Amino acid sequence: MFTNQHHLRHLLRPHHYASEEQYRAELRHLFQPVWHPLAAKSELAKPGDFLTFDLLETPTIIRNFDGELRAFLNVCPHRHSRLTDKAKGNTEKLRCQYHGWEFNKDGGTGKIPDAKAFRPWDRDTACLRRFQLDTCGDLVFVNFSDNPRPLREWLSPVWDAWQDYGGAYRYAATWEKDFPCNWKVVLENSLESYHIPQVHPYTFKDFPPEENAWHELTDQFTSFKTVQPRDFGGRMQEWIVRRLGHPVTNEYWHRVLHPHATGSTLDPFRMMQCVFPTGPASCRYRCIFFTLRGHRANPFAWVLFRTLRAIAMVIGKKVFAEDGSIYGSVQRGMECSPHAGVIGTREERVYHFQKYVLDNTRGPRELQQVLVPTEANGVCPG
Ligand code: FES
Ligand SMILES: [Fe+2]
């Protein structure tokens, strides 16, 4: 059931989706303080495994140091080269690709070629910049600020739900794609089921009736729950989940912890989706995908696991492509829109997200201006 009975104001204006000033404010106030789900632990299982990321104007490397995961700025303190340009790999040492400085798990220097050329040695300025890293289930989170809130505290509304990424669910793949739109276009699309008949006519077909759609709305996060219909596909899915020794719920949950950490769960899979701004009107979407392995070790369960994984990947990619087909059009329309926009009750999570953005990037003065309806801005009274 929806919380609101009447439509809501579209709080953000087109300039919030295109201005350099808004982009800078969001980087600083929304993204800098929070944790970012970047990887699955199983992607970094072996000592020497590393992954690199180019997100939020902060090149980052995560590496396994003898079983311990550490995150650093992927920039060398010698003469600023990236330590590596590879997206992933395995190396015996963390070594800069330019002159070969080596670094230990604390970010301090190890072997330096022709070290005597750097006498007297200034150890403090020769350290890599280290970031906080922590995990929830199999998910690896990194924080770029100096004094972050503990991950457990930041994740408190979703901690229990996201613990089972890993365990009965195995890492399957990471999908990443750049879109020519502001990051909020992608995020807002994920917050409503209203677009389903138009954008997903073959995969999801129709949105659930209000009696089968539950929203939870808070300042910090929002969620959506629906129970899957028991049609042929639903029964097949239930049969496979039972054969893998996992409890059946038939519940689909979509939870967004503001600004961007988005967990989608259904019995066959777990998805962690994140969208990062890469400029005022561009963004990068990343999805870390897990599928159900269950608890049974017999060969039949193994075949079912592989089959379920293959089907879930095909459907997941199709849905991802369908959503991706609309983002550019929304951005282009926004650039010349004379309208204020309006939000329906089925889209009420979008309103809460927009209020969060305004509350945290502008402060009360602009929020007040946007909330007060005037004829000039064409806002509907609501
Ligand atoms: S820039 Fe890294 S070793 Fe020189
Ligand atoms: Fe969608």
Image: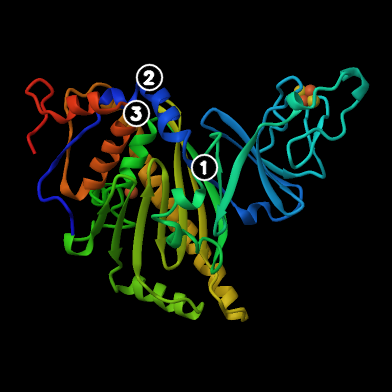
Tell me, yes or no, whether the two marked residues, 2 and 1, touch with CB atoms within 8 Å: no
- Inter-mark Cα distance, 2 to 1: 26 Å
- The amino acid at mark 3 is Thr
Q: How is the image coloured?
A: rainbow
- The amino acid at mark 1 is Glu
- The amino acid at mark 2 is Glu
- Mark 1, residues whose alpha carbon is within 10 Å: few (<14), some, or many (≥20)? few
In the rendering, at what x and y percent does residue 133 appear? 60, 45
* Residue picked out by circle 3: 361
| Frontmost residue, 318 versus 161 | 161
Q: Is residue 123 visible?
A: yes
Relative to 67, say whether 307 is above or below: below
* Residue picked out by circle 2: 21
* Residue picked out by circle 1: 176
The residue shown at (28%, 53%) is 201
The residue carrying mark 2 has its beta carbon less than 8 Å from ligand 2: no
Which quadrant, please, contains the C terminus? top left
